[in-house]
Amino acid sequence: MGEDAVGLVQLLGVIQQNIVDADDPQASYLLHCWGRMCRVLGLDFLPYLPAVMPPLMELAGAKADIQLLDDEEHAAQVEQEEGWELVPLKGKFIGIKTSSLDDKHMSIELIVIHAQNLEAAFEPYVIEIMEKIAIPGLAFFFHDPVRVASAKAIPQLLNAYKKAHGVQSPQLAQLWNTTIEKVLEVLSTEPAIDTLAEMYQCFYESVEVIGKNCLTSEHMATFIESAKSVLEDYQLRVKERLEEQADKEDGEEESEEILFAIEDDQTLLSDMNKAFHTIFKNQGTTFLPYWERLLGFYDSFITNQDPTQRQWALCIMDDVLEFCGTESWKYNQHIIQPLIDGMRDDTSANRQAAAYGVGVAAHKGGEPWAEFVSASLPTLFQVTQRPNAREEDD
């Protein structure tokens, strides 16, 4: 867009300065427009940031507009108004103004775009956004999308700060210490399954930004405690679904609600997997004493009838082999048989995970694993000769 972009941004700036009404619809269109211009212009967008950020931060920092409604007549009246949602509570109703929460969610998403595109140049805004918008947003229980957008913002804000100050700087260390405490906290408190997966993603992306040895022993212990509670809840949900299935008539299909719930759980397990992977990648063997507290879960998942659970545990064992070298041999009784069974698994993703495990045992496991690895060769050859071995998934 070259020269036209600069002319257009200046024109948009004039429009923004002339907005006087709080409910002028041009305001939110402009905010979206700034996000797109920032993507196009990159660092050339910086001169316009001082005009763009104040209204954006004001919307993103908005508090929830809530009313306690005593009688049903008043509640019905509020429900008729556009942009309100009612939540029943002990015979009364809480009215939540969702239209302002949609604006808050959209504004945080736009902040993510600015931080992503401007990186180090976005540094002047990072601390205020982190303290007043992103971290409080993780526990904003009135509106799931606000929590999701806040979770996406945190790794980008950390990255902008790291680019400005350097990975070893005391400034980054200070910001990281306060941020990681809050992120670990929401891994235990987030009530919605799909949003909890986003919180795990926020955690592992943040750890990736800060890098090697950024987690203390307290951080790793807290992570494992929250993972334990999440896995217990997951097992309960699976048990309830199996019981419901047993009560069903023959040929009766799963409801859409149950299929969505299963999908949410698979996403959650996948993001938890990436979190374990990222910790092992950055902490190596120092994570093992905390990780082994959940051995009972890995053993239960890795032999489960459900292929998703087997895959989850196989991938975690792969990480132990890949990032813990010869120390992984200590857990060989939990790893060897599942890898042998996994190479023969009828689910292609599980054969892949098991074959990968044998490969990293050979590459990284050292002398203790040599005998097992060479004994696995005939099985690996068999895997390549399965009738469907050349199909896409296999």
Image (spheres, rainbow, N blue to C red):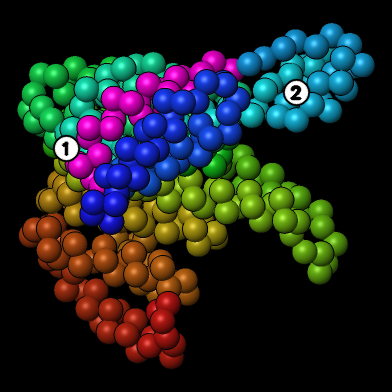
Classify residue 286 as left or right of residue 153.
left
Q: Position of residue 178 (x, y in %)?
A: 28, 17
Quadrant of the rendered image containing residue 321 = bottom left
Q: Is residue 58 magenta?
A: yes
Element carrying mark 1: loop
Query: What amino acid type should be assigned to the residue bearing mark 2?
Result: Val
For disc 2, the marked residue is 87
Magenta range = 41-64
Which is nearer the N-term, disc 1 or disc 2?
2
Which label is found at residue 62? Answer: none
Above or below for 376 versus 173:
below
| Residue for point 21% across, 74% down | 375
For disc 1, the marked residue is 211
Q: CA distance from mark 1 to mark 2?
A: 42 Å
Q: Position of residue 391 (x, y in %)?
A: 42, 85
Between 249 and 53, which is closer to the camera in this rendering? 53
Quarter of the image where the N terminus is located: bottom left
User: In this view of the protein, can residue 62 be seen by the observer?
Assistant: yes
Q: For the residues carrying marks 1 and 2, which lies nearer the camera in this image?
A: 2
Q: Is residue 170 magenta?
A: no
Query: What amino acid type should be assigned to the residue bearing mark 1?
Result: Gly
Q: Position of residue 209 (x, y in %)?
A: 21, 38
Quadrant of the rendered image containing residue 394 = bottom left
The majority secondary structure of the magenta stretch comes to: helix
Above or below for 231 versus 241:
above
Classify residue 88 as left or right of residue 177.
right
| Residue for point 47% across, 71% down | 347
Element carrying mark 2: strand
Classify residue 231 as left or right of residue 221.
right
Q: Position of residue 143 (x, y in %)?
A: 59, 29
